[in-house]
Image (cartoon, coloured by chain):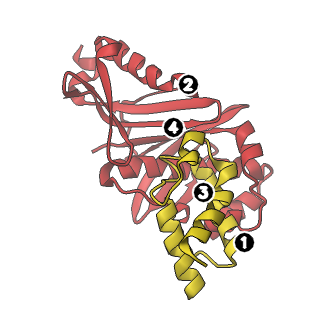
Chain colours: A yellow, B red
Amino acid sequence: MTKEEIIKKLTTIVKPYVQNEEGFKNISEETDFINDLEINSANLVDIILDVEDEFDIEIDNDAMEKMLSVKATVAIIQEKMNA
Amino acid sequence: MPNIGNDIVDLNLAKTQSDWKRKGFLEKQFTKNEQEIILNTNDSFLQVWHFWSMKEAVYKCYTQTIEKRFFAPKKFECSLISKDKGMVVFEDITFYTTTVFKDFYLHTIAKNQQKKVANFFNIGFQKTIDNDVKSKLAEITGFLPKKIEKRKSSIGAPTYYYNEKKLTKSCSISHHGNFGAFAFILENEFKRSTF
């Protein structure tokens, strides 16, 4: 799966949790879930669970710790899918 | 140095925005002990959000000093001293929490010391919370609210200034749904006793 494909799927996953539509319109690799999309921290775990389901991977605590941005999340998905 | 953090949970929003019964939800965020307490209490929903707000408030207290962001809710191990008082251990550091429960929200304040520290806090509406902090600071210090300036650290933690002078030693703002809340500790020179 290419990086673009991963970002596309991730965009669909985060959509229901987004509080800042302006930030969502401009979503890119540099987007931060909390600062730019104003996703509630309580919903970060939903994103992580959705990512696990969508990509059929398991995200451990160490990986989860870094999942605050699109870039970090894409890197983790790639790493787990290639493992 | 004393630090303070706070977290508010809009209980109606928590009901609709998250499903604590979702597979994996508890396991990803709560330790074995916490999960046991959650599942063995009458109101599991409330216990989930009580623990969550303890973890969040402590995270906000802790990250003011290290300026690092991360998402590791399980590293903050909660225990209850009483219904409203709790302790949270994060990497061998102990924090102390107090939670207020209301019909529509719950609010937790966390401190990195057990002994009393003079602090101010208030719960209001999300839309006005920034002004609420300034009004409160103006009321205590006697400075004009519009001259009080908010600055954010690299991770977004607020500090309030007046004429380049730091007013808050530690400050935390939280919002969720309809609610906003703040908690702060003043710099020594602005403490009430000096006026």
Q: Do labels 1 and 4 share a chain?
A: no
Tag 2: residue type? Lys
Q: In this view, does B172 lie to the left or right of A58?
A: left
Q: Nearer the viewer, residue B17 or B53?
A: B17
**Residue A44 got which mark?**
3
Chain bearing mark 2: B
Q: Nearer the viewer, residue B162 or B168?
A: B162
- Three-letter amino acid code at disc 4? Ser
Could you tell me which chain the residue with mark 4 belongs to? B
1 and 2 marks in contact (CB < 8 Å): no
Q: What residue type is labelled 3?
A: Leu
Q: Is mark 1 on a helix, strand or loop?
A: helix
Q: Mark 2 points at which residue?
A: B127
The residue singled out by tag 1 in the image is A53
Mark nearest the camera among 4 and 3 is: 3
Instruction: From the image, tell me which residue sits under label 4.
Output: B174
Query: What is the C-alpha distance between the residues marked 2 and 3?
Result: 23 Å
Quadrant location of residue B104? top right
For label 4, count other residues whose C-alpha is less than 10 Å away and answer few (under 14), some (14-19) or many (20+). Answer: many
